[in-house]
Image (tube, rainbow, N blue to C red):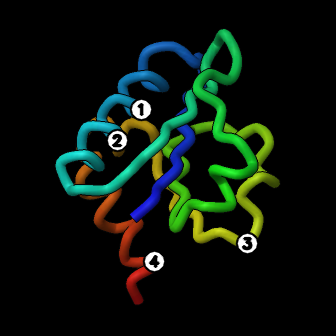
Amino acid sequence: MKIVAVTACPTGIAHTYMAAEALENAAKKLGHWIKVETQGSIGIENKITQSEANDADLVIFAADVAVKEEKRFKNKPIYRAEAQKAIKNAKSVIEEALKMVES
């Protein structure tokens, strides 16, 4: 499964990057390809291209603030969770998100 994710928190520092790392590790352990874009205090890093968004089977927003440039993911299944939830249990977030495309 090809997954793209965006992480963001109100201050754009620790939780943004902790959530990104947790999602990357969990997806790899579950055998999925993932690219995680962070929208932190220094702006957008590891930006998901329109092509990557188009090719994705699933989009995960682990964000406590509005995701910038959300229109890139139009017509894609989007699973939304708090950044903290992704940090605490990224595997669960991914498994719940996968149910959107498996059903």
Q: Give the alpha-carbon distance from disc 4 to disc 1, as whole Å.
A: 20 Å
Residue in view at x 25 percent, y 38 percent: 25
Question: Is 43 above or below relative to 19?
Answer: above
* Residue contact at pointers 4 and 2, CB within 8 angstroms: no
Q: Give the alpha-carbon distance from disc 4 to disc 2, as whole Å.
A: 17 Å
Q: Residue furthest left?
A: 29
Q: Read off the residue under disc 1.
A: 20
Secondary structure under tag 2 reads helix
Q: Is residue 84 left or right of residue 35?
A: left
Q: Read off the residue under disc 2.
A: 23
Ranked by sequence position, the earlier of labels 4 and 2 is 2
Q: Give the alpha-carbon distance from disc 1 to disc 2, as whole Å.
A: 5 Å
- Assess disc 2: are there few (<14), some (14-19) or many (≥20) residues with their C-alpha within 10 Å of its C-alpha: many
Q: Position of residue 38 (x, y in %)?
A: 56, 28
Secondary structure under tag 4 reads helix
* Residue contact at pointers 1 and 2, CB within 8 angstroms: yes
**Residue closest to the eye, 53 or 81:** 53
Q: Read off the residue under disc 3.
A: 75
- Assess disc 1: are there few (<14), some (14-19) or many (≥20) residues with their C-alpha within 10 Å of its C-alpha: many
Q: Position of residue 39 (x, y in %)?
A: 63, 27
Three-letter code, disc 2: Leu
Q: Position of residue 19 (x, y in %)?
A: 39, 33
